[in-house]
Image: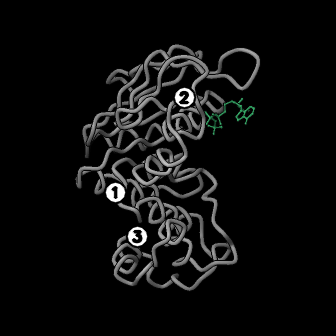
Amino acid sequence: MIEFDEVSYGYGGGPLLADVSLRLAAGSFHFLTGPSGAGKTTLLKLCYGELIASQGRVGLFGEDARSLGRDDIAMVRRRIGVVHQDCQFLDHLTVAENIGLPLTVSGRTATEEDLGELIHWVGLDGQRQSRPPELSGGERQRAALARAVVMSPDVILADEPTGNVDWDMSLRLLKLLVELNRMGKTVMIATHDLNLIRTAKQQVQARVLRIASHRVQLAGADL
Ligand SMILES: Nc1ncnc2c1ncn2[C@@H]1O[C@H](COP(=O)(O)OP(=O)(O)OP(=O)(O)O)[C@@H](O)[C@H]1O
């Protein structure tokens, strides 16, 4: 699905990520961890074509990310759902409208059939007509997850989805992501939360990638 071959990336100055090689196979579940500022969000952006590698090759569904034209990028974005760290809602739209936004942007009407089950799955039936600023942190994250999967993507990338929620809500979000993986989706979660990773490993076969000193290593079982 997503492959990095000796990828390096920097924003100027030295490389933030150096010689990264990894492979997200179909149906796999990965965590991406590492200290604040290590480059987790940057690596996720390379995974969905928001950033292009300075060196090396990022393969997205078999295509070199560098060679993708605008239509190809649009296709990639349909196949990869992203839960952004800051959710990125449009505050003047309702929760339901925000969740349906990827459909409307792609020229489809977001019908009750598209949205009803999804909103119910994330437990936001009562908040459909609310505006994003009225939501709690956990509700925002669940709405962001619903929006990320509304186009039925193959891959879900979640950037600190449990960053601002309590432990019970973290478990609830993890459960949703594990369910998606059991449905065959490829999942990668960037997180600092080692307890979340340990808990997840009891539920799903997850690999843990750790960014340290600009490199990405596969963490051992000793987390
Ligand atoms: N657009 C940008 N321009 C310049 N530097 C940037 C840009 N985006 C991120 N950086 C820098 O790159 C480094 C890595 O940022 P990134 O957001 O990828 O880290 P992270 O591991 O996700 O951090 P956190 O856990 O705090 O979210 C940081 O030092 C950040 O300041």
Identity, as a three-letter code, of the amino acid under mark 3: Val
Work out whether residue 169 can be spotted.
yes
Density class for disc 3 (Cα within 10 Å; few <14, some 14-19, many ≥20) is some
Which image quarter holds the N terminus?
top left
Is 4 rendered above or below residue 32?
Answer: above
Q: Earlier in the sequence, mark 3 or mark 1?
A: 3
Please tell me in which quarter of the rendered image ligand 1 is found: top right
Asked if the residue at tag 1 contacts the one at tag 2, i.e. Cβ–Cβ closer than 8 Å, the answer is no
- Residue 35 is left or right of residue 219, and the answer is right
Q: CA distance from mark 3 to mark 2?
A: 28 Å
Per the image, the residue denoted by label 2 is 34
Per the image, the residue denoted by label 3 is 122
Element type where label 3 sits in the image: loop
Q: How many marks?
A: 3
User: Quick check: is the Cβ at mark 2 less than 8 Å away from ligand 1?
Assistant: yes
Element type where label 2 sits in the image: loop
Q: Earlier in the sequence, mark 3 or mark 2?
A: 2
Please state the horizontal and vertical placement of residue 63, each as a whole percent of the image: 40, 33
Density class for disc 2 (Cα within 10 Å; few <14, some 14-19, many ≥20) is some
Identity, as a three-letter code, of the amino acid under mark 1: Lys
Query: Could you say which is closer to the camera, residue 152 or residue 75?
Result: 75
Please state the horizontal and vertical placement of residue 30, each as a whole percent of the image: 37, 36
Asked if the residue at tag 2 contacts the one at tag 3, i.e. Cβ–Cβ closer than 8 Å, the answer is no
Query: Could you say which is closer to the camera, residue 173 or residue 113?
Result: 113
Identity, as a three-letter code, of the amino acid under mark 2: Gly
Per the image, the residue denoted by label 1 is 175
- Residue 71 is left or right of residue 27, and the answer is right
- Residue 185 is left or right of residue 74, and the answer is left
